[in-house]
Image (cartoon, rainbow, N blue to C red):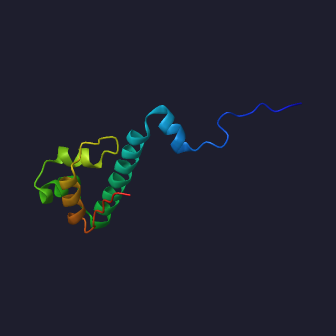
Amino acid sequence: MTKSANPHLGSSFESWLDEKGIREDVTAAAIKSVISEQLAEAMKEKGLTKARMAKLMNTSRTQVDRLLDPTNGSATLETLLRAAKIVGRDLRVELV
């Protein structure tokens, strides 16, 4: 009995994403999801509702909904920075 060789053996998830041409999209979606989750948790810790967060950010509740939606990538860096400041956090962005 012989085993068939696995053509994917030794390849990385990153190389698979590169092969499919989706690495940048997947990375961006993962980052947005983590930031959304962290903001929601920080809001909960501070007892902030979406309506109160919107008021503090001088924006609409709809905008806060988009900000907290892990599948919505339309948040600007400025919006993320304002939201982080309101919940008492820093937003760090770096190029590696």
Location of residue 84 with respect to 7 vertically, above or below: below
User: At 21% from the left edge and 59% from the top edge, which residue is drawn?
Assistant: 81
Task: Pinpoint residue 79: horizontal percent, then vertical percent.
Answer: 19, 53
Which residue is outermost to the left?
58
User: At 28% from the left edge and 62% from the top edge, which residue is drawn?
Assistant: 91
83 vs 35, left or right, is left
Q: Quadrant of the C terminus?
A: bottom left
User: At 50% from the left edge and 34% from the top edge, which residue is drawn?
Assistant: 19
Total label count? 0
Task: Pinpoint residue 93: horizontal percent, then vertical percent.
Answer: 30, 59
Q: Quadrant of the N terminus?
A: top right
Task: Pinpoint residue 62: horizontal percent, then vertical percent.
Answer: 18, 43
Task: Pinpoint residue 45: horizontal percent, then vertical percent.
Answer: 32, 66
Looking at the picture, tell me which residue is in the foreground, 35 or 57.
Answer: 35
Location of residue 13 with respect to 43 vertically, above or below: above
Which residue is outermost to the front?
96
Kindly indicate the quadrant of the structure image that contains residue 35: bottom left
80 vs 59, left or right, is right
14 vs 85, left or right, is right
User: At 12% from the left edge and 51% from the top edge, which residue is drawn?
Assistant: 59
Which residue is outermost to the bottom?
88
